[in-house]
Amino acid sequence: YVKPKHLDALTFTLYPVIEGRMACKFIWGEVTELNGVERTATIQPMFVKDKEVIDFDFCVIAAGCNFGVFHKWGESLWFPTIHAAARPEGSWPHLDERFLEGRRRHIFEEYKAIKDLNEKHASVLV
């Protein structure tokens, strides 16, 4: 999409979908280690200091599109930088894209950059 005002129409929070529609437990955090043999995951829950180990029956890895071949972490404008280790080394470490507001601010920044180029009658190679 092109305009920041379209973000609300294209996004939703996962919690009500996963807990309400799928009848699964939603845990907001980052998986830091996965043990397939034991079916456990070490997670860093949001707003909790210590990591936890949880067990699982099924594991779905939904990583999105973080395939930027020119960046160490695969950084891409099409996917929020969400991993704790990647954020400090990213191109926009001042934005915390784990939160929708961080993602929204990143979109506003990119939109402004494109708008500024347009005002200068600049050319952009895509």
Image (cartoon, helix red, strand yellow):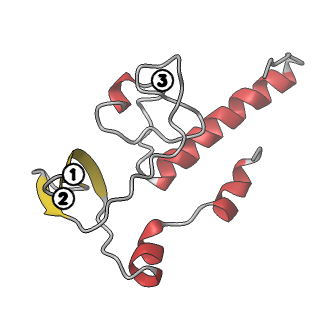
Ranked by sequence position, the earlier of labels 2 and 3 is 2
Of the pair 40 and 48, the residue shown nearer to us? 40
Which residue: 53% across, 46% down?
Answer: 103
Q: Is residue 104 left or right of residue 125?
A: left
Query: Splitting the image into 4 quarters, where does residue 29 fall?
Result: bottom left
Query: Residue 12: x, y in percent?
Result: 55, 66
Q: Residues within 10 Å of mark 1 (few under 14, many from 20)?
A: few
Q: Amino acid at mark 2?
A: Arg
Q: Is residue 117 left or right of residue 39?
A: right
Of the pair 84 and 47, the residue shown nearer to us? 84
Q: Amino acid at mark 1?
A: Gly
Q: CA distance from mark 2 to mark 3?
A: 34 Å
Q: Pointer 3: what residue?
A: 91
Marks 1 and 2 in Cβ contact (< 8 Å): yes
Of the pair 67 and 108, the residue shown nearer to us? 67
The secondary element bearing badge 2 is classed as loop
Q: Residues within 10 Å of mark 2 (few under 14, many from 20)?
A: few
Query: Residue 23: x, y in percent?
Result: 38, 82
Q: Is residue 30 above or below residue 79?
A: below
